Amino acid sequence: MTQMRHAAKRLLAGPILAVCALLSACQGGPMPQPDYPLSEETVSAALKESALSWEIEEARTSSGEGVEQTIYSLRPTEGEDGSQITINSCQSDGSGPRLQIHSRWRGDRDPEDWQKVLRLAARLYGGFQDEDEICWTCVPPEAEEGGTVSWQGALRGRYLTVSMGALSPWDSDQKILSIQLYQSKEVYDQIQAEIEEMRGDRMQQPKDEGP
């Protein structure tokens, strides 16, 4: 009888340990958030971790009025002629860190390729449970068959917008994936209001009719 009890305990130990390990992984803290604006070292490390064969071609920085910004232009290291990625990171006293990633390519692309860009965004912004959380949240099954993606909403307290599809109705072969991350929905609304205000000001400016 004692031997049977020991055998039962051994049989139960494996599944129990597996469940405990799974619970421990699920209870892990969120991904760390890097310093903003992003450094070249941070971007290069995230590219490598995301298995993206890209390298930084150009970096532009600017600062003033409580805003620091860095824009990186990336090029593929092999076999992706015509593809482009732009990473725009910004740190503002009033609105915190902001991230914009635009990826362009021509022709069909394996879903795993552009999902790597979503994972890159998760790594560069931080605060998510893991690098796949954006993919799980905003990519519908039909997108894997070439459909478009359009999603925006709150995620882990941040505000995320993702869109993917043809660059224009006249050039359906040229695709673009745009990802934007903000500190909160309030920050997103504030920035969109500022953009609309600037557009309105430009439209109201009198045109120079010349002599």
Image (cartoon, grey):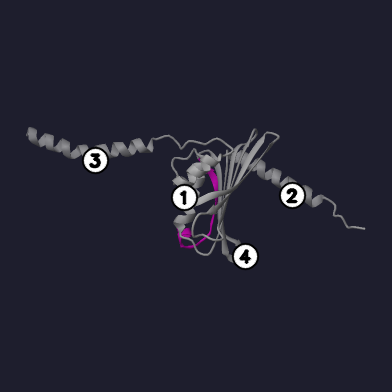
Whether residue 152 is situated above or below residue 167 in the rendered picture: above
Q: Which range is magenta? A: 140-155
Residue under the point 71% across and 34% down: 65
State the separation of the CA atoms marked 2 and 4: 23 Å
**Of the numbered discs in the image, which one, if any, rests on residue 135?**
1
State the separation of the CA atoms marked 4 and 3: 54 Å
Circles 3 and 2, Cβ within 8 Å, touching? The answer is: no
Can the viewer see residue 122 in this picture?
no
Which of the two discs, 3 and 1, sits closer to the camera? 1
> Quadrant of the image for the N terminus?
top left
How dense is the environment of label 2, judged by Cα within 10 Å: few (below 14), some, or many (20 and up)? few
Which of the two discs, 4 and 3, sits closer to the camera? 4
Label 1 vs 4, first from the N-terminus: 1
Residue denoted by label 2: 199
> Quadrant of the image for the C terminus?
bottom right
Label 3 vs 2, first from the N-terminus: 3
Residue denoted by label 4: 169
State the separation of the CA atoms marked 1 and 4: 26 Å
Residue under the point 62% across and 42% down: 70
Report the front residue among 52 and 166.
Answer: 52
How dense is the environment of label 3, judged by Cα within 10 Å: few (below 14), some, or many (20 and up)? few
